[in-house]
Image (tube, rainbow, N blue to C red):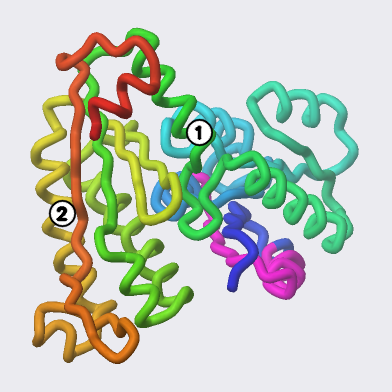
Amino acid sequence: MAEGKVALVESDERIVDLLRGPFEAAGFQVEVAPTGGEGMALCQQSFPQVVLIDVDLSDTDGFSLCRELRATTRTRHVHIILLGRGPDRESRIKGLETGADDFIAIPFDPDEVTLRVRNALRRAAADNLTDPVTGLPGRRLIQDRLRDLVGGEEGWALLGLTVRHLAPFQEIHGFLAAQEVLRSTARVLIEGGDRWGGPDDFIGASGGGRFVVITAAERADPLAEGLAARFREEVQSHHTFREREQGYMLVREGEEERRVPLMWLEVRRVLASEGPFYDIRSLTEALG
């Protein structure tokens, strides 16, 4: 199983080749984008926990991409490492000022870079910044966004989504199969957000098959309906042919078997107009 998802935004194929091997040997899932534009799209779609950006890209500079990542709701939490040529103090300071977490000079030791990435992934996991299975923002970042909502934001909709019957599915098919369902659900939310939501929508995973989406109130209904429908289509591939034909799963309980419905996505919602909400607790209670 991958230790974490890493994006490398790099135009120089030599540097890509230099880092890809050690990263994959360390268990990282590596995705590469050769330009800043492709790198931004990759980060919005794939939710890497760490992104490495070359300061000198073919279409833009890494500082601009760093600022854009920090200014975008979906990507502002990602750990950013800038790669720059030579021990340039001004570039290091500029990189940190634009929101980078680290700056590594080129040439570098690939093993050292790998260790820095691993440490960043471990810190993110320890602080609940990202969900370790899906790579989506985790519990701590969800709490931060909920505080923003009760702090006075207007016109929002909070969707609470739960994969129902995930536990019996895991009992039947195993832990790894259940994790793949969670990753598949994350993809449904990301792709659905692009189709029915907005670019600044927040998507998070709080664990146990529970997810959160924050969008504009006017997009809540089509987004909720679209996500539920898309999940119904996608989840079919995780159930066996027999389960799909029967329309249920069979869970063994001693000498007997119990019928359990196939997995489905429950979607609940709360609108800002249903408030006021004075704290996170009142908001989550309204969500049900």
Residue at image x 52%, y 45%? 36
| Amino acid at the residue labelled 2 | Ala
Q: Which residues are magenta?
A: 16-37
Q: Is residue 69 visible?
A: no
CA separation in Å, label 2 and label 1: 24 Å
Q: Give left or right: position of 224 versus 93.
A: left
Can you give x and y, in whole percent of width and height, for residue 257 in the image? 23, 85
Label at residue 141: 1
Q: Residues within 10 Å of mark 1 (few under 14, many from 20)?
A: many
Q: Up-down: is 157 above or below 191? A: above
Report which residue position mark 2 lands on: 228
Q: Earlier in the sequence, mark 2 or mark 1?
A: 1
Residue at image x 26%, y 65%? 165
The stretch drawn in magenta includes residue 208: no
Residue at image x 76%, y 67%? 18
Q: Up-down: is 10 above or below 139? A: below
